[in-house]
Image (spheres, helix red, strand yellow):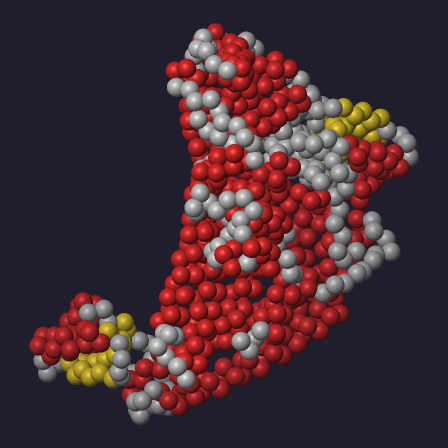
Amino acid sequence: MPKSLLRSADMKGFRALIPQSKLDQVLSALHEAGAAQFREISQEEIEREELEEGFYEINSIMGRMEEIQDFFNTTDKKTTYELEDESLENILDSTRDLLEEVEPKKEELASEKRRIEEKREEYHTQKNLLSFLEDIDVPLNYFQSTEKIEILSGKIDEDELDEFMENVRENLSEKVFVTSFGVGGTRIVVLVCRKEVVSDLRPILYRFGVEMLELPQSDKTPKQFLEELDDKLENLKEEEKQIDEKIEKIKERKAPEINALTEYLEIEVERLECLPLFGRTESTTIIEGWTLEEELTSAEEAIKEATEQSYIMRTYEPSELDVSETPIELENPKFVDGFEWLTHMYGLPRYDSTEPTLIVALTFSIFFGFTLSDAGYGLVILAFLLPSLAMIKDIFSNKLAGIPLLGTLGPYIAGARHMFRGNPRKVMIAGGLGTILAGALFGSWFGGKLGELVSVFSPLWVNPIREPIPFLKLVVFFGVLQLAIGYGIGSGRKNILRGNWRKVILEDIGNALLIIGLFLLVFCVVGMGLKEFGINYFFPKLSVFDAFNPLAGGTTLVFAYKGIFFTGLIMAVLGNLTAEGAPMMDRIGGAVNTVYSIIDFISNVVSYTRLLALGIATSVIALVINKIGLIIFGALYPATFSGALSYVLGAVGIIILLVVLVLGHLFNVFINTITGFVHTMRLHYAEFFQTFYEAGGEKYSPFKLIRKYT
């Protein structure tokens, strides 16, 4: 559980002064602890550490090792290997010995594999070429030119063949013999002429797009040559198999050592790459960085042990100058951490800004549920996402494989499920729960027919297809509430973190009161009632002029509504007029914009009505799918039939009905899930986040050692 809500995890800056002689030990200890992210030393006048002379050599050796690792594919083996002496000198000596032994073998085997691949490509090219001549029972040598006679072979489109042949005969009559072979869209043409005629023939070949063929020299017919090529390809397979066996033997024997030494080198390079971030004096090194407050003790203990207590360390809170560079670590309750994915997509918040994941988790689930508004569809989403991917594959590959429709859909369903892993899965499960809640409120279970048959499926609230106004009121209320939260809590929390109480009181609270008061008066203008929510209250009917005229009369509640509106307006205007550090014209412009922003408030809240439109559209499409299925069933199983025929038609009708319902509703779930997700995300990004969110944070990336093979 996070220490404080609506903000990222607490960060601490630190500066440590250590002996230069202990730098390697400190880097090693911090690398193992993984409790700090380094930053470049902030004082420009301090001399920087430099990359060690051996860095580029180590980097080069590591690159060679990575090539060997890739060639032998040793990373797919779970191996462990430990050097008795982990000093850099010993690691480099061991690596050089390994390279001396393995690298020549790798080069030899790689060369053999390239040769085989080149030969295979050559043979396949020849096969493709000769496949057009397979039916010609003439040795390939007959297609080779002689000292005086030129024999040309080429491919031409069937549509061009007749015109080409006619053109050759007309222009080069009795000078060129031409014939064609094959069937289908591409034909083979063979032309025979004297050497001196070739220059006259080439323009015609070019004009008709004849692709010239270089036929191999052989005393075999094309068919015999193709059979020989097949034998050669089989021989290449055998050669390749033998090479792969050699590779596998080396891999089995050397994989632990290759993986471990490569990892040791990667660790060393990571440590050396940090050096230019540090400062130095004649005998000390200065390290600056960030650490999570909860890991501060771990970071200091690592430095303390590595230096044998010969260090000085100062910690500090991020200052106003530092805050733009302070890294971010999102920290939320476990049940909403999946929604951090949505925050990441928009861009991480600045360290001194509000972190809205907790609010987004609640509102996103509700709004997504409104866009689908069918409890049956929510159950489909949960049935799709709650089982593991392995379970989904097992169900469709084994248990349902014999059922024609489900067996066919299985790979596609498994592929779609593969896309929803990790955080997207958590978000969509929450959305599915929101959909079930919305569907139960509206009595929509795969289109709403179940409510007419079984009372338990009846609407718990209203049916929005028959009574859309209550649903409209609900989404408007949610829109006003979310925007008010954005201004009052989101922006207010941000300015509290920055210590700007003037903005909190005048601008943030002012805007929240302004939008609430505005819509209370708008509800009076339309004379809206709350009976659908179990509240026996109607907003007093007022004209637009009376509603927004502070001097017009009205009930006590009307005066309260006006008080909220005008108090918020005055506070927001004063907030702009008293803005610190802004020119007077900018302050006046901000105050005027506050008045104009009333129109923006209305348009922003109106955007939330898309939830109503999408929810009703999904329900209507579901009803139409049910209707189409029943119409088809009725056409196949009319009441006039009786006897055995009626049973046959009834069975066929039921099968087709089920197919229509299953495919139709799955399609509706798929399309409207995508649509609902996009529009729900838009409401949060384009409406809610615009009230307070300030992106620009960088993810906390500690200097952390990840060991796989050592």
**In the rendered image, the vertical position of residue 71 relative to residue 122, given as above or below:** above
**In the rendered image, the vertical position of residue 604 relative to residue 119, given as above or below:** above
At horizontal 53% and vertical 28% (from top left) the residue drawn is 537
Q: In which quarter of the image is residue 699?
A: top right
Question: Looking at the rendering, in which quadrant would you find the C terminus?
Answer: bottom right
At horizontal 74% and vertical 24% (from top left) the residue drawn is 317
- Frontmost residue, 321 versus 463: 463
Question: In the shown orientation, is residue 399 left or right of residue 541?
Answer: right
Q: In which quarter of the image is residue 536?
A: top right
Q: Residue 352 at what x, y percent from top left?
A: 65, 26
Q: Which residue lies furthest to the bottom in this view?
A: 137
Q: Residue 645 at what x, y percent from top left?
A: 40, 83
Any part of residue 687 in sight: no
Q: Residue 380 at what x, y percent from top left?
A: 56, 58
- Frontmost residue, 676 versus 645: 645
At horizontal 35% and vertical 71% (from top left) the residue drawn is 635
Any part of residue 574 in sight: yes
At horizontal 50% and vertical 81% (from top left) the residue drawn is 233
Question: In the shown orientation, is residue 322 left or right of residue 575?
Answer: right
Q: Residue 512 at what x, y percent from top left?
A: 55, 22
Q: Quadrant of residue 103?
A: bottom right
Q: Exactly how many numbered labels are in the figure?
A: 0
- Frontmost residue, 387 versus 65: 387
**In the rendered image, the vertical position of residue 634 relative to residue 522, given as above or below:** below
Question: Looking at the rendering, in which quadrant would you find the N terminus?
Answer: top right
**In the rendered image, the vertical position of residue 630 relative to residue 186, given as above or below:** above
